[in-house]
Image (spheres, rainbow, N blue to C red):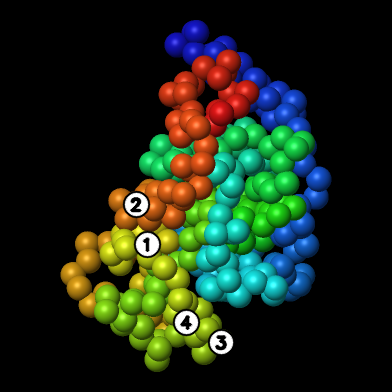
Amino acid sequence: MVVLRWIIPLILVATSLADCNHDRPPIARYGSDDPYDKEEASRVAMQIDELDEDDKQNPWELSGLFEGDIVLDKKVSRNGALKEKYRWTKGIVPYYIAENNFSDEEKQAIRKGLRAIAEQSCIKFRRYRKEDTSWVVFRSNSSGCWSYVGMRPGGQTINLQAPRCIKHGTVIHEALHALGFWHQHSSRDRDKYVRILWENIIPSKKHNFKKCNCTDFGVAYDYGSIMHYTSMVFSKNGKPTIKPLQEALIMGQNFYLSTGDALKLRRMYKRQCSRRRNTQNWEPFSEHFSSMDDIFG
Protein backbone atom coordinates (compact mmCIF):
# COMPACT_ATOMS: atom_id res chain seq x y z
CA MET A 1 0.00 0.00 0.00
CA VAL A 2 2.84 2.38 0.85
CA VAL A 3 4.48 1.71 -2.53
CA LEU A 4 1.23 2.38 -4.41
CA ARG A 5 0.89 5.76 -2.72
CA TRP A 6 3.92 7.10 -4.55
CA ILE A 7 3.75 4.99 -7.74
CA ILE A 8 0.26 6.18 -8.76
CA PRO A 9 1.14 9.91 -8.56
CA LEU A 10 4.27 9.19 -10.61
CA ILE A 11 2.15 7.52 -13.29
CA LEU A 12 -0.14 10.54 -13.51
CA VAL A 13 2.74 13.02 -13.57
CA ALA A 14 4.55 11.07 -16.29
CA THR A 15 1.36 10.87 -18.36
CA SER A 16 0.87 14.62 -18.03
CA LEU A 17 4.47 15.28 -19.07
CA ALA A 18 4.07 13.01 -22.09
CA ASP A 19 1.04 15.04 -23.18
CA CYS A 20 3.07 18.26 -22.98
CA ASN A 21 6.09 16.90 -24.82
CA HIS A 22 4.56 15.54 -28.03
CA ASP A 23 3.83 17.68 -31.10
CA ARG A 24 0.85 20.00 -30.95
CA PRO A 25 -1.23 20.19 -34.15
CA PRO A 26 -2.47 23.43 -35.74
CA ILE A 27 -6.13 24.36 -35.37
CA ALA A 28 -8.24 21.59 -36.88
CA ARG A 29 -9.95 22.48 -40.13
CA TYR A 30 -13.12 20.63 -39.11
CA GLY A 31 -14.88 21.19 -35.81
CA SER A 32 -12.91 24.16 -34.48
CA ASP A 33 -15.94 26.39 -34.94
CA ASP A 34 -18.68 25.66 -32.42
CA PRO A 35 -21.64 23.92 -34.15
CA TYR A 36 -24.12 25.61 -31.79
CA ASP A 37 -25.34 29.12 -31.15
CA LYS A 38 -25.08 30.26 -27.52
CA GLU A 39 -28.65 29.35 -26.59
CA GLU A 40 -28.44 25.87 -28.11
CA ALA A 41 -25.02 25.26 -26.57
CA SER A 42 -26.38 26.07 -23.14
CA ARG A 43 -29.42 23.83 -23.63
CA VAL A 44 -27.35 20.85 -24.80
CA ALA A 45 -24.81 21.26 -22.00
CA MET A 46 -27.55 21.41 -19.37
CA GLN A 47 -29.35 18.33 -20.70
CA ILE A 48 -26.18 16.28 -20.64
CA ASP A 49 -25.07 17.54 -17.23
CA GLU A 50 -28.45 16.53 -15.79
CA LEU A 51 -28.15 12.91 -16.95
CA ASP A 52 -28.07 10.43 -14.09
CA GLU A 53 -25.47 7.68 -14.02
CA ASP A 54 -28.26 5.11 -14.39
CA ASP A 55 -30.07 6.99 -17.16
CA LYS A 56 -30.78 4.70 -20.12
CA GLN A 57 -30.38 7.53 -22.61
CA ASN A 58 -26.90 8.12 -23.99
CA PRO A 59 -25.32 11.59 -23.82
CA TRP A 60 -24.57 11.55 -27.54
CA GLU A 61 -28.29 11.18 -28.26
CA LEU A 62 -28.87 14.54 -26.55
CA SER A 63 -26.16 16.48 -28.35
CA GLY A 64 -28.52 18.38 -30.62
CA LEU A 65 -26.87 17.65 -33.99
CA PHE A 66 -27.77 15.34 -36.87
CA GLU A 67 -28.85 12.01 -35.36
CA GLY A 68 -27.70 13.53 -32.08
CA ASP A 69 -23.93 13.64 -32.39
CA ILE A 70 -22.92 13.86 -36.07
CA VAL A 71 -21.50 17.06 -37.54
CA LEU A 72 -22.45 17.09 -41.22
CA ASP A 73 -20.07 18.50 -43.79
CA LYS A 74 -22.11 20.62 -46.21
CA LYS A 75 -19.72 19.68 -49.02
CA VAL A 76 -20.02 15.94 -48.42
CA SER A 77 -23.28 13.99 -48.66
CA ARG A 78 -24.03 11.11 -46.32
CA ASN A 79 -23.40 8.65 -49.14
CA GLY A 80 -20.32 10.59 -50.26
CA ALA A 81 -18.72 10.02 -46.88
CA LEU A 82 -18.67 6.29 -47.67
CA LYS A 83 -15.96 6.74 -50.32
CA GLU A 84 -12.55 5.26 -49.55
CA LYS A 85 -10.90 8.68 -49.48
CA TYR A 86 -12.66 9.19 -46.13
CA ARG A 87 -10.98 6.10 -44.65
CA TRP A 88 -7.84 6.63 -42.62
CA THR A 89 -4.65 6.02 -44.61
CA LYS A 90 -3.25 2.56 -43.85
CA GLY A 91 -5.73 2.33 -40.97
CA ILE A 92 -3.58 4.68 -38.88
CA VAL A 93 -5.25 7.48 -36.89
CA PRO A 94 -2.97 10.22 -35.50
CA TYR A 95 -4.59 11.76 -32.42
CA TYR A 96 -4.05 14.61 -29.99
CA ILE A 97 -5.75 15.24 -26.64
CA ALA A 98 -6.13 18.96 -25.93
CA GLU A 99 -3.86 19.56 -22.96
CA ASN A 100 -5.99 21.81 -20.77
CA ASN A 101 -9.39 20.29 -21.58
CA PHE A 102 -9.21 17.10 -19.54
CA SER A 103 -7.94 15.81 -16.22
CA ASP A 104 -5.30 13.06 -16.24
CA GLU A 105 -7.97 10.49 -15.40
CA GLU A 106 -10.12 11.68 -18.30
CA LYS A 107 -7.17 11.47 -20.69
CA GLN A 108 -6.66 7.91 -19.58
CA ALA A 109 -10.35 7.15 -20.23
CA ILE A 110 -9.99 8.46 -23.78
CA ARG A 111 -6.90 6.35 -24.41
CA LYS A 112 -8.56 3.24 -23.03
CA GLY A 113 -11.52 3.76 -25.35
CA LEU A 114 -9.16 3.95 -28.32
CA ARG A 115 -7.32 0.92 -27.01
CA ALA A 116 -10.55 -1.11 -27.06
CA ILE A 117 -10.94 -0.36 -30.77
CA ALA A 118 -7.29 -1.14 -31.55
CA GLU A 119 -7.39 -4.47 -29.72
CA GLN A 120 -10.30 -5.76 -31.84
CA SER A 121 -9.28 -4.43 -35.24
CA CYS A 122 -6.31 -3.52 -37.42
CA ILE A 123 -6.76 0.18 -36.59
CA LYS A 124 -3.67 1.80 -35.09
CA PHE A 125 -3.82 4.99 -33.02
CA ARG A 126 -0.65 7.00 -32.49
CA ARG A 127 0.27 10.47 -31.29
CA TYR A 128 0.05 13.32 -33.77
CA ARG A 129 3.30 14.20 -35.59
CA LYS A 130 4.16 17.39 -37.43
CA GLU A 131 4.17 15.68 -40.80
CA ASP A 132 0.58 14.40 -40.42
CA THR A 133 -1.98 15.90 -42.80
CA SER A 134 -5.04 14.33 -41.14
CA TRP A 135 -5.62 13.79 -37.44
CA VAL A 136 -8.21 13.76 -34.65
CA VAL A 137 -8.09 16.22 -31.78
CA PHE A 138 -10.08 15.44 -28.63
CA ARG A 139 -11.37 18.51 -26.86
CA SER A 140 -14.02 19.52 -24.32
CA ASN A 141 -14.56 23.23 -24.93
CA SER A 142 -17.93 22.87 -26.62
CA SER A 143 -21.23 21.34 -25.54
CA GLY A 144 -22.17 17.75 -26.29
CA CYS A 145 -20.46 14.63 -27.56
CA TRP A 146 -19.94 14.80 -31.32
CA SER A 147 -17.78 13.89 -34.30
CA TYR A 148 -17.56 13.95 -38.08
CA VAL A 149 -18.01 10.73 -40.06
CA GLY A 150 -14.80 9.52 -41.68
CA MET A 151 -11.37 11.11 -42.13
CA ARG A 152 -11.09 14.81 -42.96
CA PRO A 153 -7.86 16.37 -44.28
CA GLY A 154 -6.52 19.18 -42.14
CA GLY A 155 -7.64 17.75 -38.82
CA GLN A 156 -11.00 17.13 -37.20
CA THR A 157 -12.49 17.42 -33.73
CA ILE A 158 -14.11 14.88 -31.46
CA ASN A 159 -15.79 16.87 -28.70
CA LEU A 160 -16.41 15.21 -25.34
CA GLN A 161 -18.23 17.42 -22.85
CA ALA A 162 -16.74 16.71 -19.44
CA PRO A 163 -17.56 14.73 -17.45
CA ARG A 164 -20.69 13.05 -18.86
CA CYS A 165 -19.31 12.38 -22.36
CA ILE A 166 -16.06 10.91 -21.09
CA LYS A 167 -17.35 7.40 -20.67
CA HIS A 168 -15.70 4.33 -22.12
CA GLY A 169 -18.58 3.60 -24.49
CA THR A 170 -19.02 7.22 -25.57
CA VAL A 171 -15.33 7.51 -26.49
CA ILE A 172 -15.64 4.34 -28.59
CA HIS A 173 -18.88 5.58 -30.19
CA GLU A 174 -17.47 8.94 -31.28
CA ALA A 175 -14.19 7.40 -32.46
CA LEU A 176 -16.15 4.94 -34.62
CA HIS A 177 -17.91 7.88 -36.26
CA ALA A 178 -14.51 9.36 -37.08
CA LEU A 179 -13.51 5.99 -38.54
CA GLY A 180 -16.53 6.05 -40.86
CA PHE A 181 -19.46 4.50 -38.96
CA TRP A 182 -23.05 5.79 -39.12
CA HIS A 183 -25.69 4.81 -36.58
CA GLN A 184 -27.01 1.27 -36.87
CA HIS A 185 -30.69 2.31 -36.91
CA SER A 186 -30.18 4.31 -40.14
CA SER A 187 -29.03 1.29 -42.18
CA ARG A 188 -31.00 0.69 -45.37
CA ASP A 189 -32.35 -2.71 -44.22
CA ARG A 190 -33.41 -1.54 -40.77
CA ASP A 191 -37.16 -1.98 -41.46
CA LYS A 192 -36.63 -5.75 -41.37
CA TYR A 193 -35.39 -5.48 -37.80
CA VAL A 194 -36.97 -2.46 -36.12
CA ARG A 195 -40.15 -0.47 -36.37
CA ILE A 196 -39.87 3.30 -36.15
CA LEU A 197 -42.79 4.63 -34.10
CA TRP A 198 -43.14 7.95 -35.88
CA GLU A 199 -46.14 8.98 -33.79
CA ASN A 200 -43.96 9.13 -30.66
CA ILE A 201 -41.11 11.16 -32.14
CA ILE A 202 -40.67 14.89 -31.55
CA PRO A 203 -41.77 16.34 -34.93
CA SER A 204 -38.62 18.44 -35.37
CA LYS A 205 -36.47 15.35 -34.76
CA LYS A 206 -38.00 12.99 -37.32
CA HIS A 207 -35.22 13.67 -39.83
CA ASN A 208 -32.86 11.81 -37.49
CA PHE A 209 -34.55 8.54 -38.42
CA LYS A 210 -33.95 8.72 -42.17
CA LYS A 211 -32.20 5.74 -43.73
CA CYS A 212 -28.89 6.16 -45.53
CA ASN A 213 -27.43 4.13 -48.36
CA CYS A 214 -24.74 2.84 -46.02
CA THR A 215 -22.97 -0.44 -46.66
CA ASP A 216 -22.96 -2.98 -43.85
CA PHE A 217 -19.95 -4.88 -45.28
CA GLY A 218 -21.97 -8.08 -45.09
CA VAL A 219 -22.45 -7.83 -41.32
CA ALA A 220 -25.95 -8.59 -40.05
CA TYR A 221 -28.08 -5.93 -38.36
CA ASP A 222 -26.81 -5.65 -34.79
CA TYR A 223 -29.21 -4.72 -31.99
CA GLY A 224 -26.29 -4.75 -29.58
CA SER A 225 -24.12 -2.38 -31.61
CA ILE A 226 -22.59 0.51 -29.69
CA MET A 227 -23.83 2.60 -32.64
CA HIS A 228 -27.51 1.70 -32.11
CA TYR A 229 -30.04 4.18 -30.72
CA THR A 230 -31.82 3.34 -27.47
CA SER A 231 -35.57 2.77 -27.66
CA MET A 232 -36.65 6.12 -26.16
CA VAL A 233 -34.50 8.51 -28.18
CA PHE A 234 -36.27 11.75 -29.27
CA SER A 235 -39.53 10.67 -27.65
CA LYS A 236 -42.17 13.40 -27.26
CA ASN A 237 -44.38 11.49 -24.84
CA GLY A 238 -42.22 9.06 -22.87
CA LYS A 239 -43.12 6.19 -25.18
CA PRO A 240 -40.65 4.20 -27.32
CA THR A 241 -39.60 5.55 -30.70
CA ILE A 242 -37.90 2.33 -31.85
CA LYS A 243 -39.26 -1.18 -31.37
CA PRO A 244 -37.28 -4.33 -32.24
CA LEU A 245 -39.14 -6.73 -34.52
CA GLN A 246 -37.13 -9.66 -33.20
CA GLU A 247 -36.47 -10.61 -29.62
CA ALA A 248 -33.48 -8.55 -28.52
CA LEU A 249 -31.76 -8.94 -25.18
CA ILE A 250 -30.36 -5.44 -25.61
CA MET A 251 -30.95 -2.64 -28.09
CA GLY A 252 -28.48 0.19 -27.90
CA GLN A 253 -25.69 0.13 -25.31
CA ASN A 254 -22.85 2.45 -24.35
CA PHE A 255 -20.30 0.08 -22.87
CA TYR A 256 -18.34 -1.94 -25.42
CA LEU A 257 -17.58 -2.65 -29.07
CA SER A 258 -19.96 -5.43 -30.11
CA THR A 259 -18.85 -8.46 -32.12
CA GLY A 260 -20.68 -6.99 -35.12
CA ASP A 261 -19.00 -3.59 -34.68
CA ALA A 262 -15.55 -5.19 -34.60
CA LEU A 263 -16.24 -7.37 -37.64
CA LYS A 264 -17.56 -4.44 -39.65
CA LEU A 265 -14.53 -2.34 -38.72
CA ARG A 266 -12.11 -5.08 -39.79
CA ARG A 267 -13.88 -5.48 -43.12
CA MET A 268 -14.12 -1.73 -43.67
CA TYR A 269 -10.36 -1.30 -43.24
CA LYS A 270 -9.12 -4.57 -44.73
CA ARG A 271 -7.61 -2.86 -47.79
CA GLN A 272 -6.13 0.10 -45.89
CA CYS A 273 -4.49 -2.10 -43.27
CA SER A 274 -3.08 -4.50 -45.87
CA ARG A 275 -1.01 -1.62 -47.26
CA ARG A 276 1.20 -1.36 -44.21
CA ARG A 277 3.96 -3.82 -43.43
CA ASN A 278 3.23 -4.31 -39.76
CA THR A 279 -0.43 -4.77 -38.83
CA GLN A 280 0.33 -5.26 -35.14
CA ASN A 281 -1.31 -2.35 -33.36
CA TRP A 282 0.90 -1.95 -30.31
CA GLU A 283 2.88 -3.61 -27.59
CA PRO A 284 0.86 -5.15 -24.73
CA PHE A 285 -0.46 -2.33 -22.58
CA SER A 286 1.37 -1.64 -19.34
CA GLU A 287 0.21 0.48 -16.46
CA HIS A 288 3.83 1.50 -15.79
CA PHE A 289 4.40 5.18 -16.46
CA SER A 290 7.46 4.42 -18.61
CA SER A 291 5.11 3.15 -21.35
CA MET A 292 2.85 6.20 -21.37
CA ASP A 293 4.90 8.21 -23.86
CA ASP A 294 3.12 6.67 -26.83
CA ILE A 295 0.62 4.00 -25.93
CA PHE A 296 -0.54 3.14 -29.43
CA GLY A 297 2.74 2.99 -31.31
Q: In the shown orientation, is residue 96 left or right of residue 207?
A: right
Amino acid type, callout 4: Lys
Identify the residue under disc 1.
Answer: 217
Instruction: Report the residue marked by disc 4.
Output: 210
Q: Is residue 28 above or below residue 12?
A: below
Residue, disc 3? 204
Amino acid type at circle 2 is Leu
Q: Nearer the viewer, residue 147 or 236?
A: 147
Distance from disc 1 to disc 3, alpha carbons, whole Å, reads 31 Å
Per the model, the C-alpha gap separating discs 1 and 4 is: 20 Å
Which residue in the structure is indicated by mark 2? 263
Q: Nearer the viewer, mark 4 or mark 2?
A: 2
- Quarter of the C terminus within the rendering: top right
2 or 3: tag closer to the N-terminus? 3
The x, y position of residue 76, in whole percent, is 65, 72
Callout 3 amino acid: Ser
